[in-house]
Amino acid sequence: MSTICARKVRPHRFCFRCAHQNALEGFSRREFVPICGGNNGSFDLVCFSGGECNASFSRAELQKFLDPGNYILFERIRSQVEFEKVKSLSL
């Protein structure tokens, strides 16, 4: 089974095991990218392709390769990143 990033043209495909491991590493490095042009202040995990792809993963795709505990961890870290971004803009 596999998952894909949200890239519109030729999305990158990853096996669940690789996606899970890369996600956990991305959490620890806080590799999140702004989504929707960054205008809404929301952030998501960046594609693991290693190239110039800055697509994220849909919530449905994340839930395919993250167990419930790690998905909750993702949401907590993502919320913290968003909070820090808003806080830095208000200073």
Image: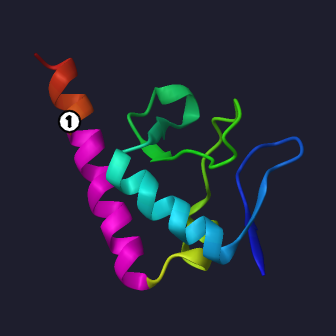
Marks counted in the figure total 1
Q: Which secondary structure, mark 1?
A: helix
Q: Is residue 70 magenta?
A: yes
Residue lying at the far left of the rendered structure: 91
Question: Could you tell me which residue is drawn at 44 percent across and 42 percent down?
Answer: 32
Q: Which residues are magenta?
A: 68-83
Q: Please, what is the dominant secondary structure of the magenta stretch?
A: helix
On screen, residue 8 versus residue 78, left or right, reads right
Q: Position of residue 56 (x, y in %)?
A: 60, 47
For the C terminus, give its image quadrant.
Answer: top left
Q: Eyeballing the image, is 33 above or below 16?
A: above
The one nearer the camera, 1 or 21, is 21
> Nearest the camera: 69 or 26?
26
User: Could you classify mark 1 by the number of other residues whose Cα lies within 10 Å: few (under 14), some (14-19), or many (20 or more)?
Assistant: few
Question: What is the quadrant of the N terminus in the image?
Answer: bottom right
Which residue type carries mark 1?
Glu
Work out which residue is located at the far top of the displayed protein and give it: 91
Of residues 2 and 22, the one nearer the viewer is 22
Question: Residue at coordinates 62% horizontally, 78% vertically from top-left?
Answer: 64
Q: Is residue 54 left or right of residue 41?
A: right
In the image, residue 40 lies in the stretch drawn in magenta: no
Q: Point out residue 55 in the picture as x, y percentages from the top left corner.
A: 65, 41
Outermost residue on the right side: it is 10
**Residue 86 image offset from top left, x and y in percent:** 23, 30
Q: How is the image coloured?
A: rainbow
Q: Residue at x 76, y 74 (%)?
A: 2
Residue identifier under label 1: 84
Relative depth, front residue between 18 and 62: 18
Residue 52's quadrant in the figure? Answer: top right
